[in-house]
Amino acid sequence: MALALATGCASVSSERLKADRLDYGQVIADSWKKQTLLNVVRLRYADPPMFLEVTSVINSYSVAGRANAGASLPSAVDPNVLNLFAEGAWSNTPTVTYQPLIGEHFTRSMLQPIPPVAIFQMLQAGWSPKFVLSTAVSSVNGLRNSSTVADSDPGFEELVDALTRIQRAGGLGFRAEPRKDGSAVILVMQRKDADKAVAEDRRRVGELLGLTGDSDEFDVTYGLVPRNGREVAVVTRSMLEIMLYLGGGVELPPEHVASGRALPGRAADAKAAPLVRIHSGLSAPSDAYAAVQFKDHWYWIADDDIVSKRPFTFLMLLFSLAETGQPAAAPVVTVPTR
């Protein structure tokens, strides 16, 4: 006497989908950090950057199983026998699609200056003016920020410090207005209920920028010199400029400096410290925020260096803000099951 039992295809557990979504997200984030760090190092060595964007992640699951069971009546040879047999099949086939950043997309994302509206949206979101303006802006009304070849004008440092204090007091705001020639950014410095310290900071900002009149609102435009006393002219950096600037913080191996293999960094007597410190060594670090190998050395940002991690993360956020044309497809996880 025999009994047969068969089962059809089994379903994929929802826990599997949750785990894979987090796993793929973490892997993409880590690879994004490493790719960005590698390109910063490449630029310091005068190598061209290369970006591969993850445009899609498709993961196909398949689960199948079968079970058979048989039983025999007692006999002299086998007084009581129960035979069981089971088998299953599981497949997981991920497909990742990459798109190189080239042509017009490269020009829009890497070479064009970041729109002023994007910069001031970061300030409106709560990022400090001292941090945002020092990273992404070349000049404001002619006041020059620091670069890889020169220190900033004293007035620029004073400006960002005063704007930071006004922001902390709740007296700094921005808004975008639609106009015929595109959207415009309006800088708002409120004077109502301002204490003496904030009022003095506001007066000093107006003095540094050459603002005139009693208005609380000023137009923000892209340019080197304002056209009138109610305009704030901002020259923003491109993503390539920002990466070159951050590359000044790469600690090059002494032999590479001596042999002239890399571009010069910040001058030894520069007043401002580099925004990001990127260490180098012959072996991989045991614990790092991001680490990559380039040629015969390793380069990394220490995981306990929050001062460097913050602007590096800001750099990656700027990649999204720098896109001024048709946006590319974002990474998508599609998980068909059967």
Image (cartoon, rainbow, N blue to C red):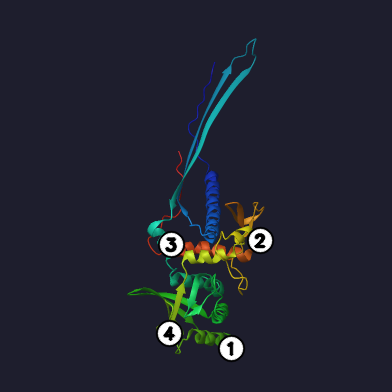
- Could you tell me how far apart the alpha carbons at marks 1 and 2 are, in whole angstroms? 39 Å
Q: Residue at x 44, y 72 (%)?
A: 116
Give the residue type at disc 3.
Answer: Ser
Q: Earlier in the sequence, mark 1 or mark 2?
A: 1
Q: Residues within 10 Å of mark 3 (few under 14, many from 20)?
A: many
Q: Residue at x 53, y 49 (%)?
A: 24
- Name the residue that disc number 1 marks: 196
Residue 302 in view of the camera? no
- Name the residue that disc number 2 marks: 304
Which marked residue is nearer to the observer: mark 3 or mark 2?
3
Q: Quadrant of the C terminus?
A: top left
Q: Residues within 10 Å of mark 1 (few under 14, many from 20)?
A: few
Confirm or deny contact between disc 1 and disc 2 (CB under 8 A).
no
Circle 4 sits in a helix, a strand or a loop, which is it? loop
Residue 178, position in %: x, y?
Answer: 36, 74
- Name the residue that disc number 4 marks: 230
Q: Is residue 24 above or below residue 67?
A: below
- Could you tell me how far apart the alpha carbons at marks 1 and 4 are, in whole angstroms? 23 Å
Q: Residue at x 63, y 56 (%)?
A: 288
Q: Residues within 10 Å of mark 4 (few under 14, many from 20)?
A: many
- Quarter residue 183 falls in: bottom left
- Name the residue that disc number 3 marks: 109
Q: Earlier in the sequence, mark 1 or mark 4?
A: 1
- Could you tell me how far apart the alpha carbons at marks 3 and 2 are, in whole angstroms? 30 Å
